[in-house]
Structures are given as C-alpha cells and as structure tokens.
Amino acid sequence: MNSVVNIANRFHQDESGAAMVEYTVLLGIITVAVIAIIVGVGGWVTGRWTGLCGNLNTSGVGTCVSGKGT
C-alpha cells in the first residue's frame, strides 16, 4: 500500500506532463494560425487571379476561363 502512495506522490510532483500539455496547446494555436494564413492567402490569390482573368478578357489580347488559361 505504501508503494502506491509513493507512486501517486511522484506523479503529483512530476511537472513534465503539465509542460507537455502546454506545448500541445501552443502547437494547436500555431496550427490554427498557419491554417488561417493559408486560407487567407488562398483567397487573396484567387481574387487576384480572377481580376487578372477579367482584365485579360476585356483587353482583347487573350481569353481566360476561370480555372483554365488559354
């Protein structure tokens, strides 16, 4: 019975588990931020590409169909 109490005390005093949780939360925050940046940049690129395609169609130099360049 005494060894169970000693094991429980060691787990209670060990802070490596708490540090692991903190690093996991930090990794989650960084992951969400990276995904948000990728989605934002993707939207910006899509808007720019759509604008370029529209300008190309109205210029008479060439044609552009969304998703297909000719």
Image: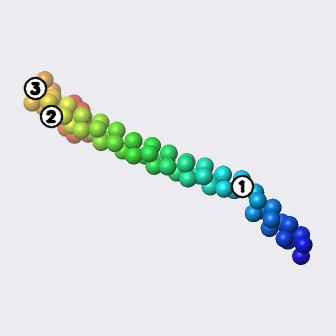
Amino acid carrying label 1: it is: Glu
Of the residues shown, which amino acid type is indicated by label 2?
Gly
Checking the image for residue 54, the label placed there is 2
Q: Position of residue 52 (x, y in %)?
A: 20, 31
Between 10 and 29, which is closer to the camera in this rendering?
A: 10
Q: Earlier in the sequence, mark 1 or mark 3?
A: 1
Tell me the CA gap for discs 2 and 3: 9 Å
Q: Residue at x 65, y 52 (%)?
A: 20
CA gap between label 1 and label 3 equals 66 Å
Residue 70 falls left or right of residue 20: left
In the rendered view of the protein, which quadrant contains the N terminus?
A: bottom right
Kindly identify the amino acid type of the residue bearing the numbered disc 3.
Ser
In the displayed structure image, the side of residue 59 where residue 37 appears, left or right: right
Q: Closest to the observer: 67 or 42? A: 42
> Given this view, does label 1 or label 2 mark the residue nearer the observer?
1
Compare residues 19 and 39 and report the one nearer the observer. 19
Gap between marks 1 and 2 measured at Cα: 59 Å
Contact, CB < 8 Å: mark 1 with mark 3?
no
Residue in view at x 80 percent, y 65 percent: 9
Which residue position is annotated with label 3? 59
1 or 2: tag closer to the N-terminus: 1
Most foreground residue, 46 or 61: 46
Q: Is residue 26 above or below residue 13?
A: above
Circle number at residue 15:
1
